[in-house]
Image (cartoon, rainbow, N blue to C red):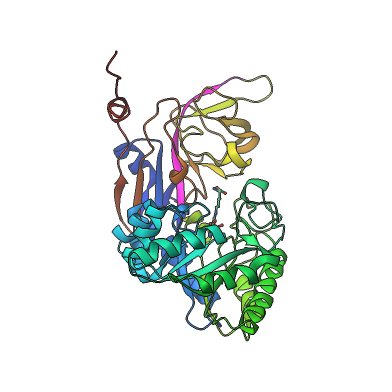
């Protein structure tokens, strides 16, 4: 459920008509709903009601805007970060260091030192090599790092190949059969306190079976590690729960279904569970608002050319992702069209032969479910300034990231001395 609804013929974000935001801040622009974000936090928490003291660490990569992170900090969430930059953004938004988990396959010594000095709650390590480096960095600072190893459970999550992470040949985690040896090595390293196990098999998961299989493997490993003398106090189950993008296909399992499955599998583990939800918290809490530049005649269907491009919303081009595309002021008619951006490549196609609200030049269009992996993946391809973001709360709204002026792009380039 979200708070983007048509009222008096105009789509609103909570109490604010999207037409007003477009007029005052221009398009394209991302618009987030505070009430929706807060609702999703509540629903996720309620789904975990059967689990003692869950540590919910929002996956910052899904939406690192400071206003969004501050909203989540206020709601009591921690953060899952995968870079020094995400760590600093989470801290700047007021997320306590102790609630931060540092994931990621390529942490550098500098990033490790940053996390150690900040005093983050846990490092999720992806290799013995990384464990050795972290131990060195920690001892040089006179600190000890609480660590988990992310294991690769060799489970196919059944999602898009580019966002599957738990198959044996994916780059993530340590080989399951070598996990016990990895913990033995970590226990010898002076700067580490190996107290956790972590797993994450992919994103936009629409079936709980692979997650259950992966979690069961974590349970077996915890027992093996304890038998080998390790003290395991946390299990990080990652993120990945899918959200409904297309109202015409069956919805993914609900947070409640997910929570019940987790409670069932983890009963008796006697650890603190960590969750790293991203999309399920912010996905449906954002839209990308764009204006139709023109409707161009096509051979079979017309092309609706909007002022947002694949640089602003990469998901359809990268993952063939399906976003619902709706008129902000629908007139009741529909048509079949191709929706494209202004960028000079065919990949800049948001939807082909899509039945949608009939729109014409000048109309506003909303790409739904764009709050996760939208603005955060935007870039400046075709020399387009980074897309701005706004957030709504009730009747109020504010721009929380300005549109990047083209002058900023020009000034960022430096000429070499010979030119
Ligand atoms: N934890 C780890 C270690 C992750 O790698 C991810 C996502 C998450 C948590 C959060 O997953 P979520 O709950 O949001 O599914 N750009 C892609 C998604 C990439 C996800 C990467 N990792 C997309 O637009 O679909």
Query: How many numbered marks are there?
Result: 0
Q: Residue furthest top?
A: 419
158 relative position to 305: left or right: right
Residue plotted at (32% across, 28% down): 409
Q: Residue at point 37% right, 53% down?
A: 110
Quadrant location of the C terminus in the rendered image: top left
Main SS type for the magenta part?
strand
Q: Nearer the viewer, residue 100 or 67?
A: 100
Magenta-colored span: 286-297
Residue 218 coordinates in the image, percent (x, y): 65, 72
Image point (62%, 56%), residue name? 202
Q: Is residue 155 above or below residue 388?
A: below
Residue 71 vs residue 92, the one in the foreground: 92
Displayed quadrant of residue 320: top right
Q: Quadrant of residue 37?
A: bottom left
Query: In the image, is residue 165 above or below residue 51?
Result: above
Question: Image quadrant of ligand 1?
Answer: bottom right
Residue 397, percent from left and from top: 30, 52
Name the one closer to the observer, 270 or 141: 141
Residue 103 in the image: x percent, y percent?
49, 60
* Left-right relation of 314 to 155: left
Does the image show residue 325? yes
The reply to whether the magenta stretch includes residue 110 is no
Residue 46 relative to residue 210: left or right = left
Is residue 289 rendered magenta in the image?
A: yes
Compared to residue 223, the image places residue 74 above or below, namely: above
The answer to whether residue 9 is seen in the rendering is no
The spot of residue 394 in percent (x, y) is 33, 59
């Amino acid at each position: 459920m979200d708070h983007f609804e048509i009222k008096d013929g105009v789509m609103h974000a909570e109490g604010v008509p999207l037409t007003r935001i477009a007029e005052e801040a221009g398009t394209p622009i991302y618009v987030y709903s505070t009430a929706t974000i807060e609702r999703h936090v509540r629903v996720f928490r309620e789904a975990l009601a059967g689990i003692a003291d869950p540590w919910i660490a929002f996956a910052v990569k899904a939406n690192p805007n400071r206003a969004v992170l501050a909203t989540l900090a206020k709601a009591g969430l921690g953060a899952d970060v995968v870079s020094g930059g995400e760590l600093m953004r989470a801290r700047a938004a007021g997320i306590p260091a102790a609630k931060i988990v540092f994931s990621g396959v390529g942490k550098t010594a500098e990033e490790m030192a940053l996390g150690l000095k900040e005093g983050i709650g846990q490092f999720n390590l992806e290799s013995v090599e990384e464990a050795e480096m972290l131990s060195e960095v920690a001892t040089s600072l006179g600190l000890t790092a609480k660590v988990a190893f992310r294991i690769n459970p060799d489970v196919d999550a059944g999602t898009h190949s580019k966002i599957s992470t738990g198959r044996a040949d994916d780059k993530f985690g340590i080989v399951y059969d070598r996990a016990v040896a990895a913990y033995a090595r970590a226990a010898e390293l002076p700067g580490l306190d190996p107290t956790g196990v972590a797993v994450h098999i992919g994103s936009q998961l629409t079936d709980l079976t692979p997650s259950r299989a992966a979690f069961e493997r974590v349970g077996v490993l915890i027992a093996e590690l304890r038998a080998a003398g390790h003290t395991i106090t946390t299990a990080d189950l990652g993120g990945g729960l899918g959200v409904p993008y297309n109202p015409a296909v069956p919805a993914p399992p609900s947070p409640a279904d997910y929570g019940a499955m987790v409670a069932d599998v983890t009963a008796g583990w006697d650890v603190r569970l960590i969750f790293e939800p991203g999309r399920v918290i912010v996905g449906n809490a954002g839209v990308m608002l764009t204006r139709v530049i023109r409707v161009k005649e096509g051979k079979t269907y017309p092309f609706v050319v909007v002022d947002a491009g694949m640089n602003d919303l990469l998901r359809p081009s990268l993952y063939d992702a399906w976003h619902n595309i709706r008129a902000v002021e629908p007139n009741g008619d529909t048509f079949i069209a191709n929706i494209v951006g202004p960028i000079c490549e065919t990949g800049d196609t948001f939807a082909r032969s899509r039945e949608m609200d009939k729109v014409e030049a000048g109309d506003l269009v909303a790409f739904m479910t764009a709050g996760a992996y939208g603005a955060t993946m935007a870039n400046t391809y075709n020399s387009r300034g980074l897309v701005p973001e706004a957030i709504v709360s009730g009747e109020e709204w504010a721009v929380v990231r300005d549109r990047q002026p083209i002058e900023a792009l020009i000034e960022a380039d430096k000429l070499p001395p010979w030119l």
